[in-house]
Amino acid sequence: MTGNKLVTYLKKSFFTGAFKTVIVTLSTIIFLPLIIQQVGMETYGLISLTLIFGGMVVFADFGIAKSVTLLIGQNEDKNNVNTIVSNALMINLSMLTLIGFVFFMLVYFNVPILGEKLQITHSLKNFILFVGFILLAIMLINNLLVAILEAYYLVHYANIGFSLSSILINVFIYSTSILTDSIYILLMAPVVSFVSVSLYFLYIIKTHTKVGFTKPDRKQIKNMLSISYKFLNIGLINSLMIPANKYLLIYVTGSSATLGIFDIGLKIAMIANSFLNTIAQPLFGVFSNMNKNKKEIFKIASKASILLLLLYIIGSSVFYFSGKYITHFIDMEHHEELFLIGMILLVGITFSSVSEPFYRALLGTERLNEALYLKLLIPVFNIIFYFILGYENSLEQIAFAYSLGVFLSSFIIIIYYIKSYRKAITK
């Protein structure tokens, strides 16, 4: 890709990513207060509980999605794409079958997966697990579809899909809550949203690429697995930390309302982080296609990181002064807790976007072991701070522990990449 085309692509990715963030923000501001008013914080917490299992997508994916982007990017003539995609799908479906069997056995033997403090019926607990597994399967397919889009410089279409998902999930939940009082039907609302986005991704791939399916190649599957397990290790850290902290919170407190507050705080932080990451999001595909040009990669990553740092400072300041008005609008009853938890999570989580260009540079140049060790710092710091912080309030304790873990690990990623680059060019 030439310099002009690269700039054009990055602009498309940024503007559609920014548009996505605006849509997510507006959708959340408009529908979240209505949903909570309609169903209550406890029921909202149960809906967010089903989405926890979507965090397992990184395990079912087995690092295949990132491997697909990397391998397609390295395949200059794109003559082996169909085999790469078919191999990836076969591996993912195999993992999904295994996870489904484990889920079935846990339910069959009445293992308290959701803990014993959650005061809901046994049948509702099982239904939450069922919906969680369905969402896991759909997210797994979407991961693969987004990986293909990223490899073909079509991230801007992925951003549009994510915007669509945000609108639909809120619309379906709210409309369902009006039409029926059944918690079972309400819990199925997110499924319809994710299926709709899957169909959109499939349409874009069909109309903008020549990707198809062919017979999987066993030899290439082994090669893909040798790469993907490294992405798996990294992905497990990235994707499981939030579900793990949610699970810890519901296990310790048994309060779906507390989980709802934590989930909304995460939404606030993730919306801000999503906006910042629109700058870094397409860089993995770009760096995968230019992985030998270390100097250019460092130049692009550095400029992106500086810009993100400036936006991080501005965004954090804006929420500090205006956040109370936002949380009061979302839920008057819990607005003070929402502001505090939102502020704690926002400061730590959004700082990860500042390190994201350097992190994606590590992935795009196949420095996967280094990326893994650096990301391992998140759970390490998370656990350390959880036990150090002696809060009586479990919600604040878990929020602080996770936020600090992300902040420190992100800071170390920046320092490490800069030092390693300077060391490499002086040799």
Image: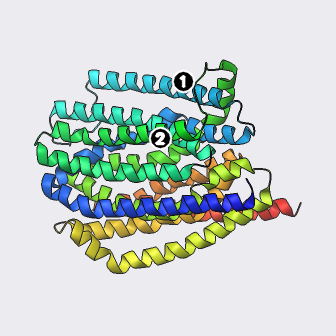
Instruction: Please state if 381 lies on the left or on the right of 220 as rendered.
Output: left
Instruction: Please state if 373 lies on the left or on the right of 273 as rendered.
Output: right
Quarter assignment of residue 139: top left
The residue beneath circle 2 is 201
Q: Where is residue 142 in the image (x, y as percent from the top left)?
A: 46, 39
Residue 364 visible here: yes
Quarter assignment of residue 21: bottom left
Using the numbered discs, state the Cα–Cα distance from disc 1 to disc 2 in whole angstroms: 19 Å
Residue 9 or residue 132, whichever sits in front: 9
Q: What residue lies at 53% left-to-right and 53% top-to-bottom?
A: 156
At label 2, the amino acid type is Phe
- Outermost right residue: 427
Q: Residues within 10 Å of mark 1 (few under 14, many from 20)?
A: some
Q: Which colour scheme is used?
A: rainbow
Query: Which mark is drawn over residue 90?
Result: 1
- Outermost bottom residue: 321
Q: What residue lies at 57% left-to-right and 41% top-to-bottom?
A: 208
Helix, strand, or loop for circle 1? helix
Mark 1 or 2: in front is 2
Q: Do the residues labelled 1 and 2 touch (CB within 8 Å)?
A: no
Q: Position of residue 421 (x, y in %)?
A: 77, 61
Q: What residue lies at 24% left-to-right and 30% top-to-bottom?
A: 126
Query: Which mark is drawn over residue 155?
Result: none
At label 1, the amino acid type is Met
Q: Where is residue 70 in the image (x, y as percent from the top left)?
A: 66, 41
Q: Quadrant of the C terminus?
A: bottom right
Quarter assignment of residue 267: bottom left
Instruction: Please state if 310 lies on the left or on the right of 347 as rendered.
Output: right
Q: What residue lies at 73% left-to-right and 59% top-to-bottom?
A: 297
Helix, strand, or loop for circle 2? helix
